């Protein structure tokens, strides 16, 4: 999951390089999710229930896992290096932990709070020194990007709280993709962000397609893991996403980072390791 999801960031950088915007990409992502999840669901002889309780599940996953975080992530990616976005996404477990504490899923721990502090220092290192970002005027987009891991952290806890309602991960993503499409199309139309597929495809369009397929595959695994291991443990895939995202960004895009970014990278991974739960009762 980490290697596949990490590749999405540099590929998305290519997708936004020609001006494609967040909700136009989310529309494509939802359509591809419907085809993949819907095709597998029908092939397995299952159906998509549309009861009120299932619609709340689909709406929650669509909002916390796609509509909100992808808007912030894609918008920030257009202005920041893909490797920086990969490091920021490692904050998922650090956001998930306090939410889990409030909801009663996890117990307070000095070690975990120390891990959260490491993550905060990492962001300061990226935002503070003038050598960290290619353009210091873009620091606002760094803080905008922080909303993506916040919503992903909330999604894991929402899934634990609400439960799958008898559905498997593919069915859940099928329903979430339907809801996501219904919401994202009017927004994309209203803001002029629709990306028509009826045009010659360049690198950006292929990047959108490939990123959507990779994101879907990793996401199915993520939803499955939440049900098996709980939100905090599952969110630790973020540090593998971060490591692979930095590696892929260097290989695919030729990105190079200052010593401050590498220090932030190490601090972020240490922070995530400290946040991880010590109990295995949910595994």
Image (cartoon, rainbow, N blue to C red):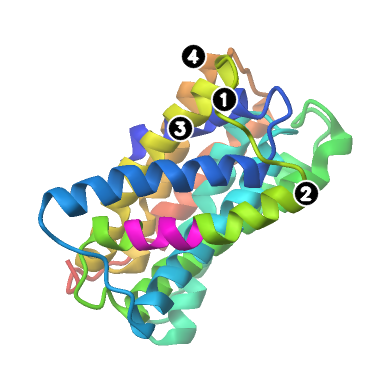
**Whole-number angstrom distance, CA of label 4 to CA of label 1:** 31 Å
Looking at marks 3 and 4 on the same chain, the residue that comes earlier in the sequence is marked by: 3
Q: Name the residue under label 3.
A: 211
**Residue 45 in the figure: left or right of residue 176:** left
Disc 1 on helix, strand or loop? loop
**Inter-mark Cα distance, 1 to 2:** 19 Å
Query: Considering only order in the chain, which callout, 1 or 4, is on the residue closer to the N terminus?
Result: 1
Determine crowd level at label 2: few under 14, some 14-19, many 20+ residues with C-alpha closer than 10 A: few
Q: In which quarter of the image is residue 197?
A: top right
Viewer-nearest of discs 1 and 3: 1
Closer mark to the observer between disc 4 and disc 1: 1
* Residues under numbered marks 1 and 3 in contact, where contact means CB atoms less than 8 Å apart: no
Q: Where is residue 144 in the image (x, y as percent from the top left)?
A: 73, 52
Q: Which residue occupies the foreground of this view, 82 or 212?
A: 212
**Tag nearer the camera, 2 or 3:** 2
The question of residue 2 being in magenta is answered with no
Q: Where is residue 283 in the image (x, y as percent from the top left)?
A: 17, 66
Label 3 packing within 10 angstroms: few (<14), some (14-19), many (20+): many
Which residue lies at the image location 38% right of the left edge and 46% below the top edge? 33
Determine crowd level at label 4: few under 14, some 14-19, many 20+ residues with C-alpha closer than 10 A: few
Measure how far apart labels 2 and 4 are at the Cα level. Answer: 34 Å
Question: Is residue 116 at least partly visible in the picture?
Answer: no
Residue 119 screen position, x and y as percent: 57, 54
User: Real-space Cα distance between discs 1 and 3?
Assistant: 19 Å
Nearest to N terminus: mark 2 or mark 4: 2
The residue beneath circle 1 is 198
Cβ–Cβ under 8 Å for marks 4 and 1: no
- Name the residue nearer the viewer: 130 or 237: 237
Residue at which label 2 appears: 191
Q: Which is nearer the N-term, disc 1 or disc 2?
A: 2
Give the Cα distance between marks 2 and 3. 23 Å
Q: Give the range drawn in magenta.
A: 174-180
């Amino acid at each position: 999951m980490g290697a596949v999801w990490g590749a999405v960031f540099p590929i998305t950088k290519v997708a936004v390089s020609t001006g494609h915007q967040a909700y136009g990409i989310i529309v494509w992502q939802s359509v591809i999710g419907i085809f993949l999840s819907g095709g597998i669901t029908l092939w397995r002889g299952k159906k998509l229930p549309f009861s009120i309780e299932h619609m709340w599940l689909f709406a929650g996953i669509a909002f916390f896992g796609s509509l909100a975080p992808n808007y912030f992530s894609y918008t920030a990616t257009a202005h920041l290096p893909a490797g920086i976005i990969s490091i920021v996404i490692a904050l998922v477990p650090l956001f998930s932990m306090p939410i889990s504490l409030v909801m009663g899923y996890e117990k307070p721990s000095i070690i975990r709070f120390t891990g959260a502090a490491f993550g905060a220092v990492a962001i300061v290192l990226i935002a503070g020194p003038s050598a960290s970002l290619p353009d210091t005027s873009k620091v606002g987009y760094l803080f905008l990007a922080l909303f993506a891991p916040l919503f992903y952290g909330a999604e894991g806890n929402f899934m634990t709280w609400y439960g799958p309602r008898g559905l498997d991960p593919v069915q859940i993503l099928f329903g979430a993709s339907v809801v996501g499409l219904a919401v994202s199309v009017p927004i994309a139309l209203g803001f002029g962000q629709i990306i028509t597929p009826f045009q010659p495809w360049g690198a950006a369009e292929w990047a959108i397609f490939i990123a959507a397929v990779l994101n879907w595959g990793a996401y199915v695994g993520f939803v499955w893991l939440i049900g098996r291991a709980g939100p905090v443990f599952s969110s630790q895939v973020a540090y593998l996403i971060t490591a692979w995202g930095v590696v892929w960004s260097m290989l695919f895009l030729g990105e190079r980072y200052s010593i401050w970014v590498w220090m932030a990278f190490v601090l972020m991974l240490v922070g995530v390791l400290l946040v991880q739960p010590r109990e295995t009762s949910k595994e």
